[in-house]
Amino acid sequence: MGKEVVLGIESTAHTFSFGIVDSSGAPGPSCSAFLRPKEGGIHPREAADHHAENSPIILNDWLENNELEPGDIGAIAYSQGPGLAPCLRVGASVARALSTRLDIPLVGVNHCVAHIEIGRERCGCDDPVLLYVSGGNTQVIARLGNRYRVLGETLDIGIGNMLDKFARDNGMPFPGGPKIEAKAKEWLQENPDASLEGLELPYAVHGMDLTFSGLLTAAKGLVDRGAPLGAVCWSLQEHAFAACIEVAERALAHTGKKEILLGGGVACNQRLCEMSSIMASERGCSSHVPEKMYCVDNGSMIARLGWMQLNHAGPTSLENSAVDQLLRTDQTDICWP
Ligand code: AMP
Ligand code: MG
């Protein structure tokens, strides 16, 4: 890759990542550092310190892996929000410093929209309903005119945070989602006739919205009352994923769209992907999920959206480059086809 590549910086939460798109907008692998707390959840200040410490190391890895010199970078994109404010500020500071030093354009992007656009690029979708399931976010999104609209979302915690908390309480360190998936799969293999009897949990769909904290409390209760951990992991996945797929299906029905696209770290889960495929095929729709490295938070999705914005709207001025921890999916103007 040569001149005019776009460098993307992701720093909304636990991951600090540099990614790339070439001059045609094609993404490559990211170089990332993941905060893995030994105890407890993600502390915003600790995560920001982790990002600041790792930033120069990751930048050097990124340049080496891509056989680039700083002078080959044509523009810098960064996550402007939503996310943890101290973490966002580290990414924005690095982006501003590089943009000023290298005298190249700066472009702030919406992290949630970046998940959609990398999925569209990787899966070749045209106009999907996105089921965005990550640590801090759970949203069902579809484009109408020049905005991605949030049709339904979690009213309390993100689905990934719920899985991580349940895992942590049961001795499985962050990230808990993959460990719960493994335990559920193992339990199902040993109990092929598994039924939800005695393993029922709240099924929390409220219109187009979702809640997960009641599910978390009830799952902890099942374990406390002696249910096997693998069985509870399986039931927790079945309930939480079915709720998400139900809302996504209703979004397909209301909008008349024909593609469902999964994104966010929880989209790495095979059972969720399977449920989505079954639902889509029953409706005559298609289900899509990008490669895992583009589901989890990554710098390349930020580079991709930055490249799109530069081509269709232009750069972000320094005065407008402040981060916004509460930035909503539908606040960003979508000015591309
Ligand atoms: P993100 O916030 O998009 O980077 O995604 C991180 C979240 O994805 C964490 O909550 C993880 O536990 C979750 N996650 C990653 N892999 C899986 C998986 N295989 N199954 C369920 N959740 C997962
Ligand atoms: Mg994310």
Image (cartoon, helix red, strand yellow):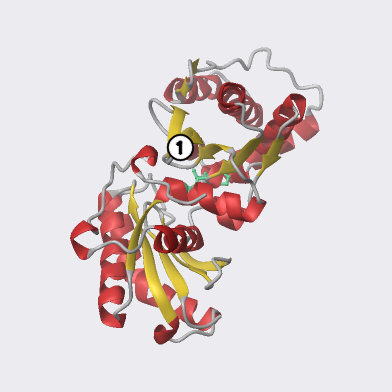
- Write the residue at 51% across / 41% down: 171
**Vertically, is 66 above or below 81?**
below
In the image as oriented, which residue stretches furthest toward the right? 192
- Write the residue at 21% across / 64% down: 318
In this view, the residue in front, 218 or 224, is: 218
Where residue 160 appears, x then y in whole percent? 49, 39
| SS at mark 1 in the image | loop
In this view, the residue in front, 335 or 228, is: 335
Given the image, on which type of amino acid does mark 1 rest?
Gly
Q: How many marks?
A: 1
**Horizontal side, residue 285 vs residue 129: left or right:** right
Residue 16 occupies quadrant: bottom left
- The answer to whether any part of residue 270 appears in the image is no
**Vertically, is 73 above or below 281?**
below
**Vertically, is 35 above or below 19?**
above
In the image as oriented, which residue stretches furthest toward the top? 197
**Vertically, is 86 above or below 92?**
above
- Write the residue at 30% across / 55% down: 88
Find out if the beta carbon at label 1 lies less than 8 Å from the nearest ligand 2 atom.
no
Where residue 170 appears, x then y in whole percent? 51, 36
**Horizontal side, residue 54 vs residue 270: left or right:** left
Question: Dot 1 surroundings within 10 Å: few (below 14), some, or many (20 or more)?
Answer: few
In this view, the residue in front, 113 or 186, is: 113
Where residue 99 appears, x then y in whole percent? 30, 74
Q: Which residue is mark 1?
A: 145
Where residue 216 appears, x then y in whole percent? 47, 26
- The answer to whether any part of residue 55 appears in the image is yes
Q: Quadrant of the N terminus?
A: bottom right
- Write the residue at 67% across / 43% down: 288
**Horizontal side, residue 159 vs residue 180: left or right:** left
